[in-house]
Image (cartoon, grey):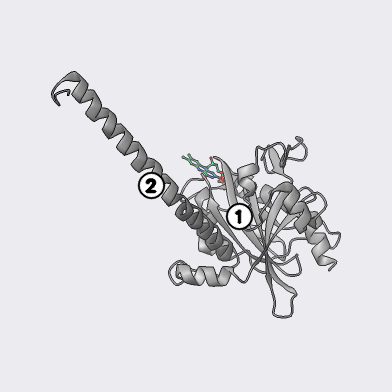
Amino acid sequence: MASKDSVAGTIKVALILCVVCSVFISSAAVILKPFQVANKLLDRNKNILSAAGMFDPALNSNAEVDELFARFTIQVVELDSGEILGAERLAELGIDPATYDERSVFSDTQFSDVLGEDEDIADLKRRVRFSTVYTLPTEDGAVETIVIPVSGYGLWGTMYGYLALDGDGNTVNGIGFYEHKETPGLGGEINNPRWKSLWPGKKVYDEQGEVALNVVKGTGEGDFEIDGLSGASLTSRGVDNMIAFWLGPNGFGPFLTKLKEG
Ligand SMILES: Cc1cc2nc3c(=O)[nH]c(=O)nc-3n(C[C@H](O)[C@H](O)[C@H](O)COP(=O)(O)O)c2cc1C
């Protein structure tokens, strides 16, 4: 038998240690995976509720988030047609609306297309074909609120958030960003509650059905204008482009038109 101080003994101890550690790490990864998935979904749900003005991190517990979010219906929309995917099409595509994450298929050629230069107003490079929409029904089954994922390039990177609209598909209910690279105090003010409070009540489409909601330099007036962020014109323009893209014909425009038509 090799003495534990011999070279063979040292290698044996090192090998046993490696096997024990790798078993420990793999088990931890497998055991923790469901918690990671649950936390990711909880985070998503908080962001959605937050955009709809239904979540305050200082007041709402995780259990309350689950309860509030359970009131939403999760559906997947084909952006080009504006149609909600039925069970058969979802099965064909292998999409589960509860966990579908458009960002994870952003580069997948089966699920997304390259945007032409003239179409790519939010500087996204690609666009997914299918996107989730989160609908809050009223007690009589009408749509109270609809929340859509939005993204667009700011000054330093892509900003990701959710836009909540009232059931008319035209009145803004709220907005929130959960990921961006803008400078704190400048472009980072997109998450300032005071700035976000300028959005509810604004309208998206003019009488011709064109996207009229926009972020202006200086003070916004009337139904369609949001104040630009001072010292952060480039981020403000990014948000403006994001709105024009996602509420327009290449974004949720066709879906919202169908919603408005009932
Ligand atoms: C270090 C640094 C960080 C900046 N970060 C941002 C930013 O996140 N968003 C933005 O729009 N402008 C940012 N700016 C300012 C822009 O360069 C530009 O001056 C500004 O967008 C112009 O806005 P204004 O026309 O409202 O003054 C930054 C500037 C510096 C020097």
Q: What residue type is labelled 2?
A: Ala
Q: Are the residues tagged 2 and 1 within 8 Å (C-beta)? A: no
Most distant residue in the bottom direction: 140
Closest to the camera, between mark 2 and mark 1, is 2
Q: Quadrant of residue 48?
A: bottom right
Give percent across and percent down for residue 214: 70, 55
Q: Which residue is labeled 1 in the image?
A: 99
Most distant residue in the front direction: 1
Tell which of 75 and 121 is nearer to you: 75
The mark tally for this picture is 2
Q: Which amino acid does label 1 sit on?
A: Thr
Which residue does the image show at 57% across and 62% down from the upper left?
196
Q: Which residue is labeled 2 in the image?
A: 28
Query: Of label 2 and label 1, which has the lower sequence position?
Result: 2
Which residue does the image show at 17% across and 23% down from the upper left?
2
Q: Dot 2: what SS?
A: helix
